[in-house]
Amino acid sequence: VQLQASGGGLVQAGGSLRLSCAASVRTFSRYGMGWFRQAPGKEREFLAAITGGSTYYADSVKGRFTMSRDNAKNTVYLQMNNLKPEDTATYYCAASQGFAPRTESRVDAWGQGTQVPVSS
């Protein structure tokens, strides 16, 4: 599976942004999908994951970020609201065959990353 993330860009604190991740795979609905991020000097962290019937969030983004998927378009989204300067990071989408990718060990494929700088 190949993943193409898009939608990053500079945003002011308090603003919103929607990231997209398109997958090139015929059996997209069978994949669990996830979003991670990596801030400068920090380790990559889990943000959200979605399977066919469940969605999971890290405590740090619960209530502000919403993950969704459109199987007809082979695409997942991450709607990010009330962004904060500490949300500044490179955001990565991830795919897992059969699991919700809530840890890196469950990830089978990564997107290329899209940068989200949040200005104060």
Image: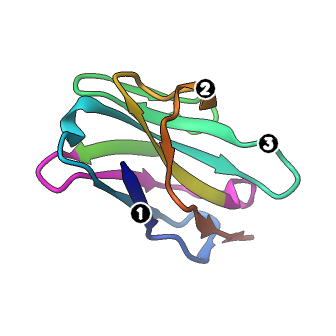
Measured in 3D between alpha carbons, the distance from the residue under mark 1 to the one under mark 2, in whole angstroms, is 20 Å
Quarter-of-image position of residue 32: top left
Q: Which mark is residue 105?
A: 2
Is residue 64 among the parts visible in the rendering? no
In the rendering, at what x and y percent does residue 58 appear? 57, 30
Question: Residue drawn at (48%, 36%), measured in percent from left and top?
Answer: 108
Which residues are the magenta region?
Answer: 70-89
Magenta span includes 74: yes
Q: Say which quadrant the C terminus sits in.
A: bottom right
Residue that extends furthest to the bottom in the rendered view of this protein: 10
Q: Secondary structure at mark 2?
A: helix
Q: Which of pointers 3 and 1 indicates the residue nearer the eye?
A: 1
Q: Mark 1 falls on what kind of element?
A: strand
Q: Is residue 85 left or right of residue 23?
A: right
What is the x, y in percent for residue 65? 47, 45
Along the polypeptide, which appears first: circle 2 or circle 3? 3
Q: Nearer the viewer, mark 2 or mark 3?
A: 2
80 or 115: nearer the eye? 115
Query: How much space separates mark 3 and mark 1, taking CA atoms?
Result: 21 Å
- Return the residue at label 1: 4
Mark 3 or mark 1: name the one nearer the start of the chain.
Answer: 1
Instruction: Give coordinates of residue 66: x percent, y percent.
Output: 40, 43
CB atoms at circles 3 and 1 under 8 Å apart? no
Vertical arrangement, residue 86 with respect to residue 18, above or below = above
Amino acid on which the number 3 mark rests in the picture: Glu
Q: Residue furthest left?
A: 72
Residue under pointer 3:
43
The amino acid type of the residue labelled 2 equals Ser
Q: Quadrant of residue 30?
A: top left
